[in-house]
Amino acid sequence: MGDSYHAVCDSAYPLVPSIPGCRERRLVMTSPAGQIGSRLDPWMQSYARRTVGMTTSEIRALFAVASRPEIVSLAGGMPCLTALPMETIADTVAHLLRTQGLTALQYGSGQGDPTLREQILEVMSREGISAHADDVVVTTGSQQALDLVTRIFIDPGDVVLAESPSYVGALGVFAAYQAEVAHVASDDDGLIPEALEERILDLKAAGKRIKFLYTVPNFHNPAGTTMSQERRPQVVESCQRHGILVLEDNPYGLLGFDREPYDALRTLSDDGVVYLGTFSKTFAPGLRVGWALAPHAVREKLVLASESAILCPSAFSQMTVSTYLATSDWMAQIKIFRELYRERRDAMTQSLEALLPRASWTHPDGGFYVWLTLPEGLNAKAMLPRAVTERVAYVPGTAFFADGTGQRNVRLSFCYPDPDRIREGVRRFAGVVQSELELLETFGPYDATGRGSGPSIGVQSPAPDLS
Amino acid sequence: MRQVLVLAGGLSHERDVSLRSGRRVADTLAHSGYEAYVRDVDPTLMAAIKDSRPDVIWPLLHGASGEDGALRDVLGALDIAYVGSRPASCRLTWDKPVAKALVGAAGISTPAGMALSHATFRELGAPALLESVIDSLGLPLAVKPARGGSSLGLTIVRSAAELPSAMVTAYAYGDIALIERFIDGTEVALSIVEDAEGQAYTLPAVEIVPDGGVYNYEARYTAGATEFFTPARLSGSVAASVAAVSLTAYRTLAHQHLSRVDLIIDADERPWFLEANVSPGMTETSLLPMAVEAAGRKAAGVYGAIVERALSTT
């Protein structure tokens, strides 16, 4: 075999001089002893610093199993679409293509379809917002809006304030733009204004540049909590006084179970708040239609940034949403979703009460998620393989912090599985917790430092298409 | 055209790796004259096999039923030719402490270790037992699930304070943990394949130098996170000795068709057997495909020979 070593080389590998006479091969550089090895990636030296957190992970791999029907997944964030009137939507889309196909399949405006932007004003008015369609930018899901806002405001090292915990998809964006995330203490009523003020002062004293506060005020992902009406003006005032923009991310606002929505933070300040909305939870995430409502100067930069990123959002998707809003009773559909999710929330919290006496959790009155705190000494991330063996999946709390905390926390989602599956999932989950408590009893509380994670880019959370 | 059914996925912790391995092997076979397709293992599998009667099944399942012999027992019962070691051999290999004992008895060095269940700790009391583990094996230690692959649940323990946490991590994957003396040295993987006539031969050793010092899951499957040397930077005599040691392990464990043996070579150039794999990873960052290329061979030819060999194995 020895002779054949010399016949192999990899002309694409930039660090190793090519060996004359070698035939081209992929993947592996075979080198004489003592030389540089192969890293299986010829571009290793070329990547930007912002890719540092983009690795595979054990956690991410475990989620691969969650797509199998044997597993009860309480890990995903997929809305339940079975309640949609699919036949009607199919007819609407067919009609749209027949009558306006040449527009629907063509490039559109970078800022978004003007008709849809008008309709978005109507959607936002349900949460007290009055605005102008000129200040709305349609995006590919609100996730893109989040990316654009971060892109136009953040230089590496700038600080973003965020709740504790915070939306994992936002933390990924902030990490990608090399922002420093400073978590602010939060409780059942959302961000704590005093803690916010204190954090701002500390960061300023340390010479940090704070660019914006990122908040999900309603039915928080993952916390399940809502910022109280009393705290809203305090939070906005505090940020304004310190020259900090508020980024209000509101995907779940219309999905409250027991009451009318609170007024958005945006109603408290026209020029200090960028508001993000989406049709992913109230209609269909597959269309990828979201938006940003921004002060006009910010909006101009958002449009330019969006054009450079994607040219324009999908005309077809926007016209589908626009037609749906114009031709159906979309508020009635939202009410159907609310009832469905309320029933699932009840199934989850009732099961938790019956089966997990030693844990505590939030009591969401809307949205998709319950945030659970495990008994002292348990580590949700270390416990996940056992959960997979027991056929249940969840997201460990560390995914929702940029600083490795959240080890005792778990996000359980009730949006996708039906109530019976939720009950079965919680039963399995309770068994996993019990086994883990037995381990704890044997080994005592152990030093779990270093087992959390630093900033990472989505590697601890499931992909968006996980149920 | 011969039909090869590649089984990938399954319900194990290594589902993701298995799916990637499966697609890779099926693609390679499809480009070398086989009709290869990939299928998950689920309740419809047995009926599908009976219906379609593929010529050969290549189980590329990692972890649990794919490697513990169970699924291969079923394939045997269905009387279908399949790639890889027979069930008894799988069972012996899958249980790392058993494999170590057998390979050790064949005269190959393997790190001193203990296989302990959670129940043992509960009965004897963890503090005293942990202390005696360290007294007996010293530090550092490698702690891993007694069964399982891809380094899932592996922790290198450098101080006594880290041991309880490492135990908990390993027990999350299974009831028994293997605690081994950590051997500092050069980590190499030896892939062994059979040609169409059934002659087993070693491919060049692949030397593994992970950035963080530990070849864990991230280091295995993030392209770029580990530096590989193919062939390993070993002197001629050491290269010959690791090849011989791997073949001995292969034969001792009665492996067939293909396998991978993981070794560490210490400062005195002594190879230590860590574990063997009846279903080695075949992904784009896996060691066996790398070794095939390092040998100057085409994956298509090597995999094709394995399939042909499986067809003539009863």
Image: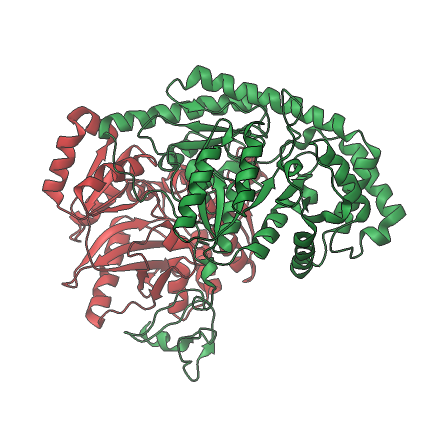
Chain colours: A green, B red
Q: Is residue B74 visible?
A: no
Residue A248 higher or lower than A150, as above or below: above
Q: Name the foreground residue: A185 vs B203.
A: A185
Residue B152 lies in what quarter of the image? top left
Q: Is residue A110 above or below residue A219?
A: below
- B192 over B82 or under it: above or below: below
Whole-percent x, y for residue A253 in the image:
64, 32
**Residue drawn where x is 13% and y is 41% of the image:** B134
In this rendering, position of residue A90 left or right of residue B172? right
- Tally of marks: 0
Q: Residue furthest right?
A: A99
Q: Is residue A65 left or right of residue B164?
A: right
Q: Position of residue A40 (x, y in %)?
A: 42, 64
- Residue B130, given in percent of the width and then of the height, sits at 16, 35
Dividing the image into 4 quarters, which one contains the C terminus of chain A?
top right
Residue ranking furthest to the bottom: A20
Picture quadrant where residue A324 is located? top right
